[in-house]
Amino acid sequence: MGRNTRKRRTPLATKIVAGAAALAVGGGGLVWANFYASAHEEHSGHNRTRSAAAQVATIDCPDVGQEIRDVPDRARGEVDGELATMDSQITDAYQRLATTRRAQAGDAQFVQNAILGPLKDRRKAIIDRIQLEINRAGGRADDNLDQLAECQGRPADQMQNGGGQNGDGQNGDGQMDDGQNQGGNGGDDDNGNGVAGPVADDFVDINDVQPNSRDSRNGLAANGDGGSTGTFTTDCGVNENNVFNSDNLIAAPGVDNGAHHTHDYVGNQDNDAFSSDEDLANADTSCQNQGDRSTYYWPVLRLQDGTQEFDANDQGGGAEGNIGKILKPAEARIQFVGSRQGDVVAMPKFLRIITGDAKSFTNGDANANTSWSCSGFEDRQVTDKYPLCPEGSQVLRTTNFQSCWDGQNIDSANHRDHMAFVQEDGSCPNGFQAIPQLQIRLAYDIPTPTVENGQVQNPYAVDSFPEQLHKPITDHNDFINVMDENLMNKVVDCINRGEDCQ
């Protein structure tokens, strides 16, 4: 399936500018941080403002993209564009939520009437267009998509369960019970560093994590006796060329700022939203093996230390609450491993895989798939907390991708259905076949944040959609296979023969 070849925008400038604290950003910058700066000047209204902020901390919308299945290829671009517009609507609604706390304090129905109601109407209009586009292209749109138009408001410490949308604890008017001031749990828009999250409860001392207690799909496809036990390692550096943007070529092709957060890129050097498959095939690569032009990308980590980055005033960066110093990994280990049940087959060129879920905080943890840990404590892993590592220990961020392919498609309408995780015994579901499993391990040198009076000082956080509040569970990782045929055959041979290659 080809991709859009619309004219590409000029790549983001990559010069990093150190300077004043992010709270000083004006104009198109951190409007919610600027709101809090003014609100705190009025001591008499401060508690009232904080109480209102605690009632509805973020906006929870059903993920329409995950419910779409039958989308003809010729409608994919239009549908992806509509879904990206819905993401922008949520971002705009969250910004309005965060900057109208005084109005909310004076009117219990303000959130519903002024934010959630109009948002539902706008989402309904887009869902209607999506259904029309699918039907015009010869598909059959789900008539029940209309039920996904309504969004809810909820406190920041109330994550959905793995069941997905519209979980317990939300009442229909979008307002939460009075008096639920979450305090250190993240009920306010300002975590003390100018944005909504992370907060103290998003961190855990690695010593308090029980060894081997994480029950996750990570590692289910690890090598084992009788399987394909080889490995292939590709060294693509740590983004020395400063390739950053807030696009998402897989989920939002042809859409500028489709991710609403900034990505780190290694491998392929032509990675914006307007890159076609041909662009990817002809691009330079940061990988030592020049046959690997694959694109590997993930949301950046930032240290909220007041640094103004190159994107401090930009959408995807500071204008959407992603502030502070971008932290590059000290090491990015990219490795492909085999199957416990037998040989693997070659990946098709331009295969796209998204793992994890950038909206896990509101969607629920069904697709969450990142292990956070510390070097020297690799047997202690968490998904929903950032680890506090002892001095000299690196923060580790590990993702094991889906390794079962449907044998036909390089992508799917929701960017998930063409791939699957292995089952408990290491085998692929019926109709799927094993491919080399991509495993990415990122190691960071990060000063350990401290918690004082229930507030985290100089926290680090993953970039996120604004309404996801920088929760660690929203971490995700993306991959497009652009290995040439000879290299992919080498990868498969090494793994199936039990060799370790690079």
Image (spheres, helix red, strand yellow):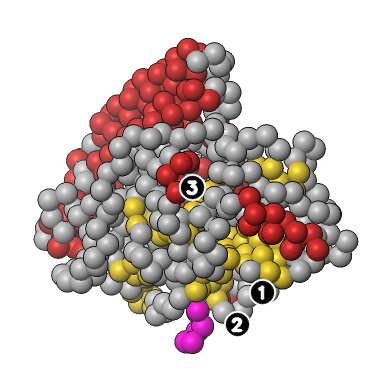
Q: Which mark is residue 376?
A: 2
Say which of 113 and 77 sits in front.
77
| Image quarter (top left, top right, bottom left or bottom right) of the N terminus | top right
Q: What element carries label 3?
A: helix
C-alpha span from label 1 to label 2 = 8 Å
Q: Judge whether residue 393 is colored magenta.
A: yes
Q: Position of residue 208 (x, y in %)?
A: 58, 76
Instruction: Give the foreground label among 3 and 2.
Output: 3
Which residue range is magenta in the image? Answer: 389-394
Residue type at mark 3 is Ala
- Our reading of the magenta stretch's main secondary structure is loop
Q: Quadrant of residue 133?
A: top left
C-alpha span from label 3 to label 2 = 39 Å
Residue type at mark 2 is Gly
Q: Which residue is under mark 1? A: 379
Instruction: Note whether 59 is above or below 15 in the view shown.
Output: above
Q: In which quarter of the image is residue 498?
A: bottom right
Residue type at mark 1 is Asp
Q: Where is residue 54 in the image (x, y as percent from the top left)?
A: 34, 51
Q: Which residue is under mark 3? A: 281
Mark 3 crowd level (few <14, some 14–19, many ≥20, 10 Å Cα): many
Instruction: Note whether 33 is above or below 380 in the view shown.
Output: above
Mark 1 crowd level (few <14, some 14–19, many ≥20, 10 Å Cα): some
Q: Is mark 1 on a helix, strand or loop?
A: loop
